[in-house]
Image: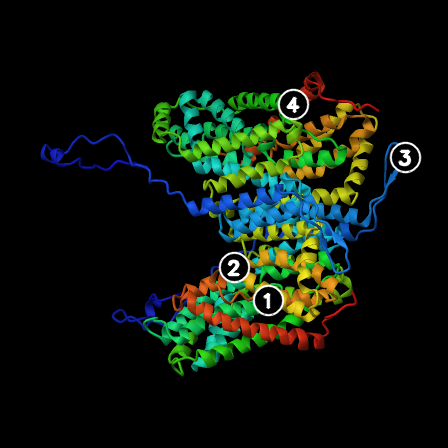
Amino acid sequence: MLMRIKKSKGSAVPARRLPHTPESVHLARPPHKIDWKRILFISLGAALFFVVYFCPGWPDAVDPKGAHFSLSHEGKAALALFLLAGIWWVFEVLPIGVTGIAIGVIQALFLIRPAQAAFSDFMDPSVWFIIGSLVIGMVFTKTGLTKRMAYKMLSLVGEKTSRIYLGCMVMTAALTHVMAHTAVAATLYPLLMAIYSLYDEENKPTRFGKGLFIGLAYTAGAGSIITLLGSARAAVAIGFFKDFTGQELSFFELSYYLFPLGWAMVIILWLFLMAVFPPERKTIPGLRERAQALYARLGPMSRNEILALVIVLSAILVLSLRSFVPFLNPLDKSAVILVATLLFFLANILTVQDLEELPWNIVLLFGGAMSIGFCLWKTGAAQWLAVQWLAMFQHAPWFVFVMGIAFFVLVMTNFIMNVAAIAISLPVALVIAPYLGVAPHVVFFSALVTAGMPFVLLVGAAPNAIAYGSGQFTSAEFFRAGIPASILLMVVLGIFIWFIWPLMGMPVLASP
Amino acid sequence: MFWSRKKPEGEKARKDGLPQMPETIYLAKAPRQIDWKRVFFLLLGIALFSVVYSCPSWPDAVDASGRHVPLTHQGKATFALLLLALTWWIFEVVPVGVTGIMIGVIQALFLIRPAQAAFANFMHPSVWFIFGSLVIGLAFTKTGLTKRVAYRMLTLVGERTSMIFLGCMILTAALTHIMAHSAVAASVFPLLRAVYSLYEEDSRPTRFGKALFISMAFTCGAGSIITLLGSARGALAVGFFQAYTGREISFFELSAYMFPLGWSLVILLWAFFMIFYGPEKKTIPGLHERAKMLYSRLGPMSPSEMLTVAIVFAALCLLSVYHRVPALENADKSAIILVSTVLFFVLRILAVKDLQELPWNLVLLFGAAMSIGFCLKETRAADWLAVQYLGLFRAASPMLFVMVTAFLVLVTINWMMNVAVIAIFVPVSLVAASQLGVAPEVMLFASLAAAGMPFMLLYGSAPNVIAYGSGLFTQGEFFKIGFQASILLMVVLGFFVWGLWPILGMPILVNP
């Protein structure tokens, strides 16, 4: 770097005359800090990959009927790649999307799958569905619809802090019905910051702040399981479900079973947070007026807001009607939501900058998750793992088995992105289910419920990371709150599996 | 919009003192301008689609031997889609990437191809290859290597105008070996500006100025055909070639044929400009000093610059030789180039932010070109079109067929995006060539060479538009010079097709 500034050379220089300015002054580079932890985890991932890749073949898995499932060389390589991706994703040694790219590269270079298959999976229709929902989230934020709803909500819930907790959580959960939970968290975060500044001027961590932001992360997860729009994982999971069982799950059917569970969790989480992080003050004076003033300032709804709302509502309508109207059935889900994307651009609501600003890192991550999911499945590694896993549940009753799967997914989803958790766990679970006479539906829904709620670790989901940005809580505090929350989730899920879902008509046991 | 500024309200108010300030002032919204041209072309595209889609089926194509090639319903729908896409692309009704998304959506919604196939093609390995090359260009620009190479060149060429002119052209062509030509044009442009300001103080148009900037645009085109990294069209065309003929063209093979063609064109273009648009002055005094100063200011090479050079060099070497190394025989070139992408992120030369800065709009465009190209193939629309096209050449010699096709590509490329031209011409001409007994290789290389050089119209390529930004020449001048240069190109290309390529070992004729 070049600077034309004078530099004194200490006491040797006469006081009256400055020394000659050197022609150019090169500043020393800042000392290069080596991030040892990062290097350690990069190497650990690579080392695990090579150890598993080069070790001699693993023994066959044996199922209860005595059939042998051998693990092919490619299958073992797929497991090796899974370990590498898992470690790189958990510790975020690379941008998560770049790890996604690495998944494709390694498959092609180590001949795990042909390059064509490995790379094309990055743009599976489910990934396009994610792009479509990310665009809807973007439109809501850009047109100001998010703000409008938020102010309206605040002027309705009033000034009691417990009501604000509940209001924010209901709002978060409600928005996740129509937009991706990552986008919901991202758009509500500034709003919660504004609310919090009315509570504590200096923005110091308080119990109210912890409850508010942890609540945002938790309910974004709990709400996101309810509709297909809430997150990417449901679309991915339905894709797997269709591939494994040949049955199509409709938008409506999914919400029918998950709506009661999602909202039960929201209410329980509210009670839980009120108990763990009771706000210091009972009310925030002046909040209602401020929200009303901000709402009034927005003026009447603009043309763009109305148009965006109409487009989104029609897309949702068509998506839900697909299961009732045979005429609409051949329409691809991703294509329908992308029509909404096209309309946003045709109506000039979005521009080319917005297209470039989509979180492509996340899209590549989802692409990578699809690619590794298909890789584990097509190479037979998923089946091998499944049969190994099955050995532990050979004599267990079906309820224990389903809860076991759900628990497995819950652990996985905390460590890896929840799309990846689904991509890895669901094929395994769907392969095991027929052995125990369990219907694929109950496995699918329990896995989906737990996949959506990584309450323990920050890396589990984007809303967790966004909420952490508020600086209200440490990752240790998040962890401590997450353990009892996860236990609550398992209890609620158990009740649903045992009583409520069968009552609602979900097939639980497969007809032999 | 909200303003709290006072506004006087006419004469009366001024006499009696200022009126009461209103609480808030709403400014009237800017009147909405409807862009009728855009609406027209938007509707025109849709109308073309509907007419072709719903019109009764077209007659079969009949080839020389009397064989009937029918056009399926899906095939006709593909043509309809192509018309719609071209209308939207040429008149940029929506961002080109959004038109790309539309291509996927329409295929899925109108059941032209299954959604899985239509969407997965967006991330065909060829598109990944382009992605990898875009990242290399980004790394070069971000580390400052482009600047370093440019200044170094200027210190070497001395002060003679003709040599400086040659140096600039060689630099441009050399950079297109590793970076996309549009990125090269963008980074060379400021350098040429600086050179020109030393030649003509007032930056008024001179013959040298015209030659300098126009030649930059031309050499970007001529250089970009040499390697697969120079532009997206190369990778796409090679991808189609593999899909249609089952043979893979390696990175090295392409460069072996294109290198002599590209460089002889660069030298001939230099001679052309020196003879017909020779510079007014013989030397540019002071340029040498200035370049030396700028170069020394850059200081020594930083570790990240050296690493970038090492990574790119290693990737190029691997790309050139991998198909001869037994261990890597089955590796994929996209995977090899993406290793460099992953390494850039592992070594922290690039960060997440840079991932976001990639031109995703264009990545979607390339994906769409791939998707429509495969659609032409899988619906057998390409076969039908090829037979119709061949009807024009009943008695012509195969060589004439190659040259006429190249000429058509050259004409089309001036007003259409080159990836779109490739997506239409390569599939059709490959099918046609096989029926005329022309080897597909010569067809591919001749089309690719012509596709790189839109010399006449500004909209043919990004470098043309960038060069036009200098303000030193008019569109008319560009057309005139470009017309002469295009004739030169056709002559050189003819020489290669008839003489040099067969000597280099390219198959020209096959037994039908």
Mark 1 residue crowding within 10 angstroms, few (<14) / some (14–19) / many (20+): some
Residue flagged by tag 2: what amino acid is it?
Trp
Mark 4 and mark 2 residues within 8 Å of each other at the beta carbon = no
Which residue in the structure is indicated by mark 1?
A: B407
Residue depth check, mark 3 versus mark 2: number of the one nearer the observer: 2
Compared to residue A491, the image places residue A52 above or below, namely: below
Residue A140 visible at all:
yes
Q: Which of these two is toward me, A237 or B92?
A: B92
Foreground tag (3 vs 4):
4
Q: Where is residue A491 in the image (x, y as percent from the top left)?
A: 66, 22
Relative image position of residue A166 (x, y in whole percent)? 49, 22
Against A33, residue B173 (above or below) is below
Say yes or no: labels 3 and 1 on the same chain.
no
Q: What element carries label 3?
A: loop
Give the camera-side residue of A246 and B261. B261
| Subunit under mark 2 | B
- A357 or A248, nearer to the observer: A248
CA gap, disc 3 and disc 1: 67 Å
User: For mark 3, what is the residue?
Assistant: A66
Q: Mark 3 is on which residue type?
A: Gly
Locate the N terminus of chain B by quadrant.
top left
Q: Contact, CB < 8 Å: mark 3 with mark 2? A: no
| Precedes in sequence: disc 3 or disc 4 | 3
For marks 2 and 1, the one nearer the N-term is 1
- Residue at numbered disc 4: A257
Chain to which mark 3 belongs: A
Left or right of A234? Residue B3 is: left
Left or right: A51 as drawn, with respect to A483: right
Residue type pointed to by label 1: Phe
